[in-house]
Image: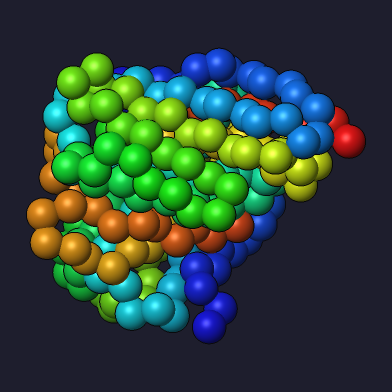
Amino acid sequence: SQQGEEDPQALSIQEGENATMNCSYKTSINNLQWYRQNSGRGLVHLILIRSNEREKHSGRLRVTLDTSKKSSSLLITASRAADTASYFCATDGNAGNMLTFGGGTRLMVKP
Amino acid sequence: NAGVTQTPKFQVLKTGQSMTLQCAQDMNHEYMSWYRQDPGMGLRLIHYSVGAGITDQGEVPNGYNVSRSTTEDFPLRLLSAAPSQTSVYFCASSYPRFGERNEQFFGPGTRLTVL
């Protein structure tokens, strides 16, 4: 079973708009990570937020974590066509050495 | 650094055939993992290793074997291929961090079709 579930499953926006993706999970975690996957490629790590952190920034990315609601959000500001990809959250916690991935959000940014 | 490399990139098998998917990393990472990705399912962990000589099962280990004789290599063996194993397979590696998993570095994937 998947620990993380992303919402929405698909998102289409215009270049320059902000994109927000959400991730919910079921059990306690050590950290939560976001990855990007371009079509036909491997996953690339974007950002890691630990359970004692509430918000983290990296360039145009902003990640929040609410452990009381067991949810996280990824915000991409001023989106670009190159941001078109699938985005996955992954949680580390319930099984020690396992990182559990959600089903992903497919983001399309139209030029 | 080449990072994480996987071979082959594409493979077609007939039901019942066996094969080995190769994975190597040159970053001296202790942790290595194998995932499969099916449409709409995200990634599911097959097997993982926390160091040479140590392996363990993930979420979907049936039909697969692994071994870790060196830090660099982590091959995945399909014992008797079945159509349900048609998928994209990703290998990943990471540095160890006490008590939690660190960011993972992924290979480009192997697209496997079982007829």
- Color style of the picture: rainbow
Give left or right: position of A70 versus A17. left
Residue positioned 53% across, 60% down in the render: B107
Asked if residue B112 shows in the view, the reply is no
Front residue of A15 and B18: A15
- Residue B113 percent coordinates (x, y): 64, 38
Q: Is residue B22 above or below residue A18?
A: below
Q: Residue at x 59, y 38 (%)?
A: A76
In the rendered image, residue A49, in percent from the top left (x then y), is placed at 31, 46
| Closer to the camera in the image, B57 or A77 | A77
Residue found at the very far right of the displayed protein: A111
Which residue is at a point 59% across and 48% down the rendered structure image?
A60
- Tell me the quarter of the picture where residue A86 sits: top right
Q: Quadrant of the C terminus of chain A?
A: top right
* Residue furthest out toward the left: B99
Q: Position of residue A3 (x, y in %)?
A: 30, 25
The number of numbered badges drawn on the structure is 0
Q: Is residue A86 visible?
A: yes
Residue B64 position, x and y percent, is 36, 44
Q: Quadrant of the N terminus of chain A?
A: top left
- Is B28 left, or right, of B101 in this rendering? right
| Quarter of the view holding residue B55 | bottom left
Q: Quadrant of residue B114?
A: top right
Residue located at (15% from left, 29% from top)? A28
> Which sits in the foreground, B93 or A111?
A111
